[in-house]
Image (tube, rainbow, N blue to C red):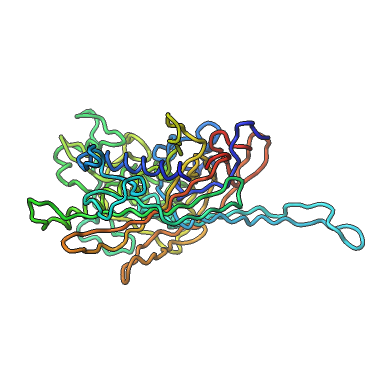
Amino acid sequence: MQNAKDTFYTTLQGRLAALNPARTMVLRGVVRPSTLVDENELPTASVAPDAFHLEWTGLRVDSSAALPLVALECSIRYATDGSAGAAGMDRGRSLAAMDAELAAALGAEPHSAPKQSYAGATVTTTGTNIFWADPVFGPATQDGERLQRTVTVSVFANQEAGEL
Amino acid sequence: MSAATGIAAVAPVARRVRAYFAPVNRATCAPTLFDPAQSGRFPLHAPPAPWIDLGWVGKFVRKCGTKVSPLLAGSPAMAVVQARSEVDATVSLEFDAWGKLQLALASGSQQTNLLLPATSAAANGSGGVAEAPVPLLTGTGPASTATGLNVGAAAAAQFSVGSLVAVDADYTGQLGYIGSGVSAAYVQSAAAVNGDLNYIRRVTLNVSVVVAIADGVLQLGTPLLAGAPTPGMQVSPLLGFCDREGASFFQEWSALFVLEGEQGDRVLVHYPRLQAMQGSAEALDSLSVPLERIRLAGAFRALPVKDTNDGETVVCFRSYLPAALREI
């Protein structure tokens, strides 16, 4: 399952970075694409704006087939205050831009990626793919001057023999 | 048989169904055959010639109507052998796109192009008498191609970017199947079509849209089905398309449907000969009250071909291409 989670994250991060290379953030002193998995970072109560935060929530395992089918639910949260130059009056446009980037990244063909393992010193490709359903966009909500949205997407993977 | 390093086989998971069209030569009853062994792994957006991408389809349902009857013997009677008493297969689907091909196939019969009517033409349900066609120039300027029509600067002024055009031969008394590239209709007598010079262009599937005009050449957005125009073909501007419930012609096409598995496997369903088995119909898909998306609904019956490998008469081929390293 971890391989599926890691593969989805790296695939989505790569697609989002290709769509908008300028969307970067500084995290632990490093400039990087603004896509991160919260559970892989230091615990914090704050949500960095203008970045895509992935959280793994639901999990279902169908063991009826020769290869168990794992369905993971990924929640992707993002928020924006708009730009300081526009005194935040462009926060709607900023949120729309993030909506469009995420929709394009998840909607692009193919809707699958070879599942990879990042457990060792080098990345290895497994024998199956991960694939995902269409995203479900939740309503935009306002928190003070901040606009935010949560998108959920179901990610599927076959659990291969010997894979944890 | 299992490979030592194989991955267990599982049921394919596919997102959608992609449809492809190829013509049937109606005069010789020769369909276009798809060879999954040669071309089964083609990229979905680039089918091998002469297949044409029809886009995604929904509500794809295949039905087997083949009847298998037991032959009984003894007392009490017991089935001792079985026989196929009837072979039948049908397909129903909904096209996502409203293109000329999709409309023509789903209409169930010949579909007319609404040619630009002549001034003071009498009103008619499928369009009035059309204005005079525009000839293609030969010997002056570039030769016309499947994507560029040389009509000359003066005639080009009659068109604008976005114009729809039908390109085909004049009707001069031909009988039988007509239409370049794809048989679009069947003419029983010249009198039935009033000897109309534009009749072939009225029904042809050899249509496109003008996306640019330069130096008397109309650049087309999609290549003409029949390829580069042949001598004698002319151009008629058109406004849209029309089909009729009750018309006599049966559209027939070679069909290929691809279900692309998310694990890299692929299911190909090939019907060499499909004929429409219903008239034009729409399926409504509610977006948000009161908005509804209108999809083209089609239903088709498979007709037989002979498999030259063993002489069997069949109506459909289903092929499965497993993903890499799968147990089989």
Above or below, B141 against A82 in this view is above
Residue A24 seen in the figure: no
In front: B16, or B36? B16
The x, y position of residue A9, in whole percent, is 37, 43
Screen quadrant of the N terminus of chain B: top right
Q: Residue at x 78, y 52 (%)?
A: B82
Query: Is B169 positioned to the left or the right of A114 in the image?
Result: left
In front: B203, or A139? A139
In front: A138, or B189? A138
Number of numbered discs overlaid on the protein picture: 0
The x, y position of residue B251, in whole percent, is 47, 52
Q: Residue at x 68, y 54 (%)?
A: B86
Above or below, B80 against A120 in this view is below
* Residue A80 quadrant: bottom left
> Which residue is situated farthest in the front direction here?
A43
The x, y position of residue B209, in whole percent, is 27, 46
* Residue B73 quadrant: bottom right
Query: Is B130 positioned to the left or the right of B322 in the image?
Result: left
The x, y position of residue B127, in whole percent, is 30, 59
Screen quadrant of the C terminus of chain B: top right
* Residue B293 quadrant: bottom left
In front: B193, or B293? B293
Residue A49 seen in the figure: yes
Query: Is B138 positioned to the left or the right of B183 in the image?
Result: left
Q: Residue at x 64, y 32 (%)?
A: B3
